[in-house]
Image: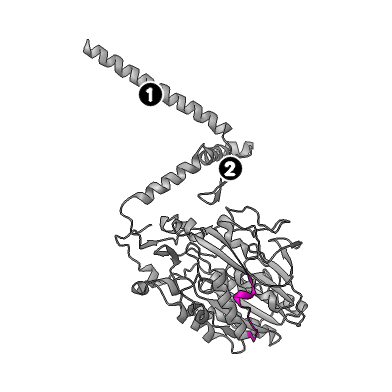
Amino acid sequence: MRRTARITSRKKLAMLNTVIFTTFLFFMGILFFVYPKSTVSDFEKRKLCAFPIFSMDSLLHGQYIDSIDLYAADNFPFREQLVEFSFNMKEWRGIRNDEIAFYNATDIKKQDAPPVNLNNSDSIQDTTATSDSLVGPPGEEVNNLFIYEGRAMEIFGGNCKMAESYARTINKYQTELQGKVQIYDIAVPSSIEFNAPAHYAKQYSTEKKNIDCVYGALDPAIKGVDAHGEIGAHRNENIYFRTDHHWTGLGAYYAYRAYCKSAGLTPLELNQMEHKQKTGYLGSLYWLTRDARLKEHPDTVEYWKIPGTYKTTVNNKGSDKALRGSIYAEGASGANGYGVFLGGDYPYMKIESEVKNGKKAVLVKNSYGNPFATYLPYHYETVFVIDYRYYTGSLLNLIETEKVTDLIFLNGVFSINTSWHIMMIGKVMHGVGKKGPTSGVKDTIKPKKDSIIGKKSDSLKPSADGIKD
């Protein structure tokens, strides 16, 4: 009797489990079709798979069914919340060291990202999944990360050989232009140079030595700007973001002061400009790691608006059509907070001022130069801002046509020590895809698979203190 009762009870329990599971699948199936779909994952910072377009060829080769599987995996109900919960579960495992953590991020791949565009209200569009503050163009490598007291820093491992290759590329412009313009080079240190604790100094290379290698190899006619010294004098101020690989508007301001000293200009004082800020910014290094130490210390994006009236036009990637731009994209917010500077990365930007001094400048930069660019228009009739990663025209033609007086190169130490960036800076001299005349300067830049992570950073050994792989 008891045995019969147990069997009956088990059957009822099995039936209940079947009903619950079937009901769950039924309602999840309905939710899959009625639940609002999103095109991007805010947490993963990537585009989600769209429903595939049917073709007989894709069906016969199995691609269509595979694409449907990917679509279902990316669009099931509550996926975003479950992914975030899963990531947090990994964070909660083990014992966390709140002071320090290392991330081996050399295998993280960045995707090509279009510039952030301005709309008619001078506010940037929502490009959360593709903003250059989160991803970068080909050649922009992600490096080992070092987190200390809520601040993320990329570990530097550059060497003089790469620095000198960069300098030789800049020297070619001096040779080609033959003194027609004054050339400046601004080598910018990164956060780890000033913010890492002394007892971890053996884990990374000094950036000052690397910058000295750059300036020591430059043609004597080119002026090397001592941004390192000016920034270092203010190391206790908010000159680098905690959660992002860029410097802040204040850090760029001190480099601007150093540039003015080299160029014989009188810099604006901070109190001569309108100060504005955006709070709660979580930058690229947070989104790469999702480390709770960084989320607990979000950044404030500060910017200073120069006095005067300016006309700004831009060209999007792959287009010659001039669009209205702005020095400041006031609508930038959230993960796009860094986009307040220039509105993002455009191949070409032209800023015209009311100044009448006969001086025109070209700034050649990547995204690191955006905050710096916002200070220049106060001193020039016209400033051309060229992003060498996207620009396909000829810098030499632009300089000659527009009668440019000053040519400024600005790069962070990581770009200076990466062959792809050096190669692209050289290519825009005559235009991407075009070869100029032989200048007699030996080109030692050979595109190759290299890493700016040197032996010091490669020798980092995980300890028991919060190591992440």
* Residue kind at label 1, given as amino acid type: Asn
Q: CA distance from mark 2 to mark 1?
A: 32 Å
* Residue kind at label 2, given as amino acid type: Ser
Can you tell which quarter of the image residue 385 is in?
Answer: bottom right
Residue 440 can be seen in this image: no
Can you tell which quarter of the image residue 362 is in?
Answer: bottom right
Q: Secondary structure at mark 1?
A: helix
Pointer 2: what residue? 38
Q: Is residue 336 above or below residue 77?
A: below
Q: Secondary structure at mark 2?
A: loop
- Residue most extreme to the front: 271
The numbered dot on residue 64 is none
Tell me which residue sits at (64%, 37%) in the image.
55
Looking at the figure, which quarter contains the N terminus?
top left
Residue closer to the observer: 440 or 177: 177
Tell me which residue sits at (69%, 76%) in the image.
378
Pointer 1: what residue? 17
| Residue numbers of the magenta segment | 263-274
- Residue most extreme to the bottom: 220
- 349 with respect to 458 (left or right): right
- Residue most extreme to the top: 1
Q: Is residue 245 magenta?
A: no
Within 10 Å of the Cα at label 2, are there few (<14), some (14-19), or many (20+) other Cα atoms?
some
Q: Is residue 272 magenta?
A: yes
Residue 13 can be seen in this image: yes
Residue 358: x %, y % from top left: 76, 82
Mark 2 vs mark 1: which is more N-terminal?
Answer: 1
Residue closer to the observer: 242 or 13: 242
**What's the colour scheme?**
one colour
